[in-house]
Structure formats: C-alpha cells, structure tokens
Image (tube, rainbow, N blue to C red):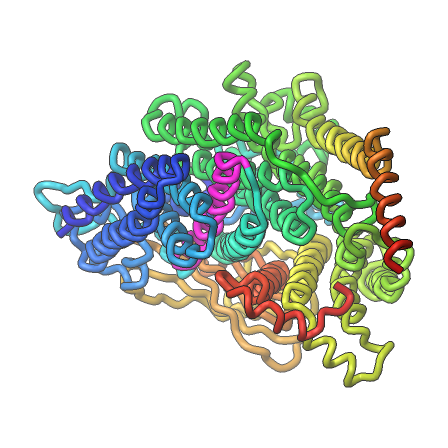
Amino acid sequence: MVEAGHFALVLAFALALVQSVVPVIGARRGDERLMAVAGPVTVTGFALTALAFAVLVSAYVQSDFSVANVWQNSHSQKPLLFKVTGTWGNHEGSMLLWVLILTFFGALVATFGRNLPRALRANVLAVQGFIGAAFFLFILTTSNPFARLRPAPFEGQDLNPVLQDIGLAIHPPLLYLGYVGFSISFAFAVAALIDGRIDAAWARWVRPWTLAAWMFLTGGIAMGSYWAYYELGWGGFWFWDPVENASFMPWLAGTALLHSAIVMEKRSALKIWTILLSIITFSFSLLGTFLVRSGVLTSVHAFATDPTRGVFILAILILFIGGSLALFAWRAGALSSGGLFQPISREGALVLNNLFLTTAAATVLTGTLYPLVLEALSGDKISVGAPFFDMTFVPLMLPLLLVVPFGPLLAWKRGDLYGAAQRLLAAFGGAVLAVLAVLLFVDGTSVFAALGAGLAAWLVLGALTDIVTKSAIGSVPFSVALRRLAGLPRSVFGTALAHLGLGLTVLGIVSTTAFQAERITTVKPGETIEIAGYALRFDGMTKFDGSNYDEDRGRFVVSRDGGRALGEIMSAKRFYPVRQTPTTEAGIRTFGFSQLYVSLGDQAADGSIVVRVWWKPLVTLIWGGGLVMMAGAAVSLLDRRLRIGAPARRRPTAAKAGVPAE
Amino acid sequence: MSVRRIAVLLVLLAGLALARPALAVLPGEMLADPALEARARAISAELRCMVCQNQSIDDSDADLAHDLRVRVRERIMAGDADEQVIDYIVARYGEFVLLKPRFSLRNALLWGTPLLLLVAGGIFVLVAARSRKRAETSLSDEEKAALSRILGEAGGKQQGGV
C-alpha cells in the first residue's frame, strides 16, 4: 500500500518533467496539440500527488510503524486529529504537503484557465511543472516519506508534544497555501518573459491569484503567531525569529505585489516592476523554504556537516531565482511599459507603498542573513535580534502607515491631495482624540504609546472614510447613499476592510507592548495575585490523565477587585512520557479583546509554585486584525471583475450597478 | 534548545528541540526596587542567551541565561549605568551577546541597508517620474509636424464637412 504512494510520487515526477518541457515547445512552435498536453498532465500530476499524500495520511491513521516516517513521528495512543496532522509535522511530510499544494494550484489553473491565451496557459503550466519536478526530485532523493523499517517496531516515537496542537492542523497548510500560491504569480511572470509580451489577460489573472495567496499567507502568519503565543508560555506574539522572518518576507513582498498588480490591472502601468515583484515574492518563498529546511539557521556548521538537503534546496534556489532574474534581465526590455501618471495620484501612492514595503522586506532579509553571511565569510559571530528589527523595521513602517488612508482617496492618474486631506479631516480629528484619550485616561507619560494608538485610529477611521466618501453618506439623501453603498465594487470594501484590519493589528500591538502588566511570584494554595484590577486566587494543583500525557493543573479563580468571581483559569504543565518531554499549557481567559495569561513554573516541596501572570490589553486585536485583513481579501476576491473565468457578457451588468467615485 | 524556536520552527525542527517548562525570570532573582528591576529587564532583553537561538536572557530558562541575569542585577546594584552593564557583559562574552549589533564598520552594511535602499529607491522613483513627464510633454519635431498636418487636415475636413 505504502509502495503505491511512493510509486505515485515517482509517476508524478515523471509527469512534471513532461509538463515542464512539452507545452513550452508547443508554445514556441505554435503547435496546438503539444500545448494541449499541459492541461491533462497537470491534473493527473495533482491526482497522483494527492494519492501519495492520502497514502501517507492513511499510514499515520493506521499507525503503520513499518514506515520510518510514521514511526519517528507518531504513536498509537495519540489522538486521531494529531495522527492526521502529524503527517506534515515533520520534514518529509511537510515537503509532500508543499508539492501537493503546488500541483493543486497547477490543476486549478489548468481547469479554470481555459479562457487564457493558449500559449500563455501552456507556458504558465510548464513553469509550474518545472518547479514541481525540482521538488519531486528533492523529496524522492533526499526526503522520502515512504521509506520502510524492517522489522517493523511495535510502537512509534510520538510527535513532538509542542506540535500536538490544533495549530498544526491550521498553520502549516495555510502558510503553504500562501507560500506556494505565489508560485502562480511567478509562473505567470516567467511565462510573460518567455512570451515577450503582457496582455490584458495577464493582469486580470495575476491579481486574484496574488490576492488568494496573500490571504492564506496572512492567515498562516497570524495563526502561527497566536499558536506561539499560547503554546510557549512566554506571552510573546512575535519574536523576529529567522523562521518567522522567513514567512514575513514573502508577506511584505506579496503585499507590495498585491498593490502594484492593482496599478497594472487598472492602468496597465508598472508592468515590468510587477513582473519583477512576482519573481521576488516567490523567491522569498523559496528562500524561506531553504532557510527552514536546510538547517542553516541552527548554525552554519550544522549545515556544513550534513549538507545533502541544504545543498539540494540551495541549488533549486539558485536555479529558480537566478534563472528567472536572468530571464528578466534579458527580456524585460522587450516589454512595453505604459500608463502615465502624476506623482500625486493613486498610482503614485501605490509606488510609495511599494518603495517602503520592498525596503522593509530587504531590511528583514538583511537582518536575517547578515549573521550567516558574516560568519561564513569572516568567522565573526554577531547576533541580530528583536532590538535590531524594532529599530529599523518600525521606523520604515511608520511613514507608510501614515499615508495609507490617502491612497484609496486619490484619483487615478492625477490626484487631489488637498481634497483627500479635507475628506480625512474627521479621521484626523478622531486620531487626535485617541492620542488625547490615552494621555488623559490611560497613561500621561507614554507619549509614544499614545501616538501609536492615534496611528491605529487614523488607519481605522481612514478606512471608514473611504467607504463613506465613495457612497457619499451624509452628502446625499440616505436612501441614495445606501443604494450607492450597495453598488460599490466589492474590491472597495476589500481595500477598506484590509486597511481597517491593519489598524486593528497596530492597535493590538501598541496596546499590548505599552500597557501590558506582568507579575512574577510564588504562590501557595489560597493566596491571591493582584494584577490590573483583577485578583487571581490560587486554588491548588490537581492531577489529570491525558491519553498520551500526564498533566498537573493549577486552578485560579478570577475576580474583579475582590468582588464576585468572574470565572476560573486552568493553567497546566504536561509531561509526555514517550518523548520524556514537559510542556506548558498556558491558562488564558479573554475579557473583551484583552486577556489574562497564566503560566506555571516549578513547584516547591511545600506546595508553593512559581507563577507568571500577564494582563494583555487588546492583545486579541493583533490576530483579529489579521482575520479582518483576510476577510478583506476574500471580499475583494468575490468582486465580479476578478471572478475567475467570469464571462465577458456579464460585465455590462456590473457596470450598470453603478460604480461612482471609482 | 529554546522552547520558542520549536513552535516557530514548527514542522521543520520538530523533534530536534526540547521544550522546558520552567519560567525565565524567577521571583528570587528580582530586585526589590521596581525601577532598578525594570532597568534590569530592559537590559536583559538586549542580551542574547548564548546557548539558545535568537532568545534574550530575559526570555530564556537556560542556566547560562539565569547566571547572566543575576550578573546584570549585581552590576546595577553596584551602581553601574546601563551602558556600563552592557560593556561589562560584552567584555566577558564578546559582541555575539548583543541582540542589537553595535554601529561599526563591520556592521555598516547591516545598519546601512534600509536607509541605502530607501534613498536609492526614492531616487529611482523620482528619476523615473521625471523621465515619464518628459516623455509625456515633449514631442519631437517630426511629431509636431505630423500633428499639425493631421490637425490641419481634420480642421480642413471639418470646415468642408460642416
């Protein structure tokens, strides 16, 4: 059975080779039959990869320990959900998930791309096939998930307990949907370079794919951040860890791409730049895969001692990034750039957005790679951590965030800055009020926090201003405004939602960073910890038997200023006997958008225990903002203009619905 | 191995890292004076736990991190300023201990990149905008001639037509 999976993977590799060669030849010769090969081969390749993946999942579910990968990462007593998610909770399985998603996207293009120009479709699928072939080869030669053990062990070694969490079910698939989703924009960019031209279909296609990939990546990062927050017991939400940076760089570049693709679709300007950004964004995804998969982050030396996988991925990296950039350098001149605009215009604002976002991505890249490069070149070891990024990344983001509300209010081609500023007067007033409110009612000394809250209010109110302006609420009769509101393109709501979500995230970060309270103390049963107006009474520890772990639970009764009880918080320490690994299960209780966070430390012989308690004001907005951004992308994807394969005859209907102020 | 890294590294380093449930800063280490303790925490956040990966001594539960936290607090109690405490630690453990590298020639590229790119990108955008403007406004002599010819013809036709 397992061999069937292995065989399917080998077949998928062979098909990927066909997919990467035949359609390109067909496109060059204008041979319809050769180009037509791309579609069925792509879909079959996806089916075979899905079969291989299903076989591995089923080996995990059945606890087939004759498969080395299952033996290393599973256990018969593990809950079913974690048996399934354990499939990608390891190197080999996660790479299989990677190619599964890659071929899935390829199959989507093959299925829904029938209205694409034939040569473009053939070239796009060929590029996808080329990426697929490289990664299939990588899996088959260095990371085979189907290797057998003989004799088969009776019991598995269990999954790393930290990964035995619902987060593993959501985070990696979302992250990979994002990472790999950018391969579509990449494939379109390379196809355009091969073809030597970009037409209207190109721009109409790239934008929704970028939007979808961006949506998933946003969700993946937000989910990963929340997972780290509750699972690790530090209460931190972002650590500037190289692995986080690896997912953040494609997000920054992808956000830039998302915005430049708008210019390209609407005004057919910034064509060459959009092509370059597509290449850069997917390059960051590949780089992230390399950084995480090669072990180079652990240490340059660890990479040098067992370089098989690392060198292979490095070769893939050089081939695809180097190859596509060389192709870009060679062919970009042949592409025509069009669409003229004044500096003060929607296009100008989006160029500014791109300038800051790409610089920010490059800053994160430099901070992440500098220590590695320096050590490899000179042997000197330096550390680049959170304080560096706080000092460089944050100042880069501030000017960008300040101008965000202006962007959507400026007209294409030639904008009216004064008019936009006038419309934003109310939002500005709201922001000033927010600053004053923080200074007067929260803390008169934290000027920076107050300004941060003002910035968040500016973003949120600015996003609302966009909607209010375009539907003319307040300046026309209410019923007319309502009709105009309903008639606005969904992408307008998408933009507003995404910018509003950004504001919420900023508010959560500012509030948590500036105003969180912390207590580190030793308590005995019956004693109370006071924090931020809440009182937590420690009721002692109880034991609990989980299916594959033992747990010590501490119970805390929460009350407000010694008044009535508001509920309880259970914080626990677990021990997983198979791996001999302890974990912390932080106790978290949400009040509105804020959270109380309780983490347990060592217990003394007299029953007292070290406890760390945090009050995290508005902390959930950090991830809530991410969800709102995702919702914005989803709404925008539903826009009729972007709906994949929407037939042309529908377009007049959309126009009739009325598109004011656009 | 740090606990943080695991969840962050997720899938990848899973299995290599070990989780430790102990907390970082312990009640026994803390200074009685909240102002001094706050300074110690701020300094600790800038110092790397050298046996961990990208973790400050304020976050780490490793023994070495504990020792360093105690050292930092000893220096503060001895009356050192923040800079002196950091110099004291760097003198013993090297610059590797700093999570924010110093401004030096060796780190020039690290610190310089953001500004360099922003300025270079800004100049590029401005130059591109200016050349676009020129392309938009200026016509070559041939184009002008062609334009006047077309306008003239159109004008003539209109006159004739109307």
Give me the residue at 67% from left, 24% from top.
B88
Residue B39 x/y as whole percent: 72, 41
Residue bounds of the magenta highlight:
A167-196
The answer to which of A399 and B24 lies nearer the viewer is A399
Q: Is residue B4 above or below residue B69?
A: below
Which quadrant of the rendered structure holds the C terminus of chain A? Answer: bottom right
Q: Is residue A317 above or below residue A612?
A: above
Image-based side of A435 in relation to A385, left or right: right
Q: Residue furthest top?
A: A378
Secondary structure mostly seen in magenta is helix
Q: Is residue B110 above or below residue A532?
A: above
Residue B52 x/y as whole percent: 49, 35
Give me the residue at 35% from left, 25% from top.
A307
Camera sees residue A618: no
Image-based side of A591 in relation to B119, left or right: left
Give me the residue at 63% from left, 57% from top.
A519
Q: Residue furthest left?
A: A151
